[in-house]
Amino acid sequence: MTSAAAVPVTFPESYPFSLLTSPPNSPRNVTSAPNVSEEHSIFNPGLGETAIVFLALILSAPTKHIYNFLESSYDIEGKDNFAALLMQFFKVAISILDNDAWPSTWLNVNILAHKVLIKMMDPVATLLKGIFIPPPSAAQQFKSDLWRDAFHMLFKLLSSDQLVIEDFTAQVRATKPT
């Protein structure tokens, strides 16, 4: 089990050494971590690593493969278990968007997360429309909790401030009149 660290060792804030290293002339009996802002006070490197691996897997897979994987999961697991899988995905995505895995100041990782989650929602939305919209005669089978979670995650993703930054290059932002 990974414990929370004040300053991450896996993703150091300074390069090439983590801030946990002490300067050469510091006293050897210092055992506390340096003062860190409140936003960085709780960080779980294991959670960050897991989220990065999750994002890298989705980023490296073509959208067609993601769709085929989800479709085969539905065929094997059935409708209820597939709905549970999608609800877990929405919870993980919301956790990533809430910056539970890394600080919100890590711009590159946050932009990557948004890009990957937008990519993932294409096959998920296709399957949601195809599988989880019942005919009018079976309206009682509508899974409102699944759709609520899907829209909550999608609205959180699309209303993010991080997406605005991705639209402009650094030069355009610097020259754009206010």
Image (cartoon, helix red, strand yellow):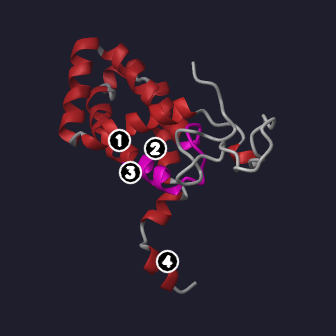
- Of residue 95 and residue 26, the one placed in the foreground of this image is 26
Residue in the foreground of this view, choosing between 47 and 69: 47
Q: Are marks 4 and 2 in contact (CB under 8 Å)?
A: no
Question: Could you give the CA–CA distance between mark 2 and mark 1, rounded to whole angstroms?
Answer: 8 Å
**Contact, mark 3 vs mark 2 (Cβ under 8 Å):** no
Look at mark 3 in the image and give the residue it sits on.
115
Residue that label 1 marks: 121
Please, what is the three-letter code of the amino acid marked with disc 4? Arg
- Which residue: 40% across, 23% down? 142
Q: Quadrant of the C terminus?
A: bottom right
- Check disc 1: other Cα within 10 Å, few if <14, some if 14-19, many if 20+: some
Amino acid under disc 2: Leu
Question: What whole-number distance in Å separates the C-alpha atoms at marks 1 and 4?
Answer: 28 Å
Position of residue 129 relative to residue 105, above or below, is above
Q: Which residues are magenta?
A: 97-115
Q: Earlier in the sequence, mark 4 or mark 2?
A: 2
Count of numbered labels shown in the rendering: 4
Q: Residue 50 versus residue 80: which sits nearer the camera?
A: 50
N-terminal of the pair, mark 3 or mark 1, is 3
Q: Secondary structure at mark 4?
A: helix
**Closer to viewer: mark 3 or mark 1:** 3
Could you tell me residue 137's position as x and y percent?
Answer: 32, 21
* Residue 26 location (% of width, % of height): 77, 47
Residue 31 on image: x %, y %: 78, 34
Q: Residues within 10 Å of mark 3 (few under 14, many from 20)?
A: some
| Residue 39 part of the magenta segment | no
Mark 2: which secondary structure? helix
